[in-house]
Image: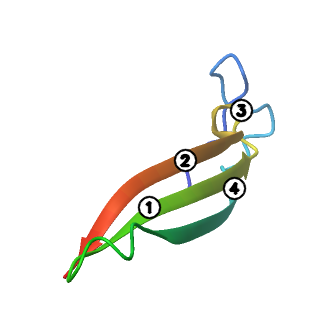
Amino acid sequence: MATVALDASGEPLPDGARRTDTVWQGAVSASFPVLGSRTGAVALALELGWDYTRHRSNDAFYCYDAQAVRVGLSARY
């Protein structure tokens, strides 16, 4: 059961509408070899990624866009 949607002051919407949400998410990632000719049996890679979330709602507190960037180093042997 959905909760009652709130306006920006935290009060229920005048029509008493229940909260409805739409969420879109996307992600992109890439891996790039690092020092391939020098690591022998271990394969090192630079890992990069970007995540995006778009959240829309009739509740004032749940309309936002969020982004995250990831950077890492991986090792395989």
The residue under the point 61% across, 66% down is 27
Q: Which mark is residue 9?
A: none
Would you say the residues marked 3 and 4 are in contact, meaning their CB atoms lie under 8 Å apart? no
Residue 51 lies, with reference to residue 4, above or below; the image says below
The residue under label 4 is which amino acid type?
Answer: Thr
- What residue did someone put label 2 on? 69
x, y (%) of residue 7? 73, 27
For label 3, count other residues whose C-alpha is less than 10 Å away and answer few (under 14), some (14-19) or many (20+): some
Residue 26: image quadrant is bottom right
Would you say the residues marked 2 and 1 are in contact, meaning their CB atoms lie under 8 Å apart? no
Residue 7 lies, with reference to residue 54, above or below; the image says above
The residue under the point 59% across, 56% down is 51
The residue under label 3 is which amino acid type?
Answer: Ala
- The number of numbered discs placed on residues in the rendered structure image is 4
Q: Nearer the viewer, residue 31 or 51?
A: 31
The residue under the point 60% across, 56% down is 50
Q: Is residue 39 among the parts visible in the rendering?
A: yes
Q: Given the current orientation, which residue lies at the most extreme front position?
A: 38
Nearer the viewer's eye, disc 3 or disc 1? 1
Nearer the viewer's eye, disc 2 or disc 1? 1
- What residue did someone put label 4 on? 20
Q: Nearer the viewer, residue 58 or 30?
A: 30
x, y (%) of residue 52? 65, 54
What is the secondary structure assignment of the residue under circle 4? loop
Left or right side of 57 for 73: left
Q: CA distance from mark 1 to mark 4?
A: 40 Å
Nearer the viewer's eye, disc 3 or disc 2? 2
- What residue did someone put label 3 on? 60
- What residue did someone put label 1 on? 46
Q: CA distance from mark 2 to mark 1?
A: 13 Å
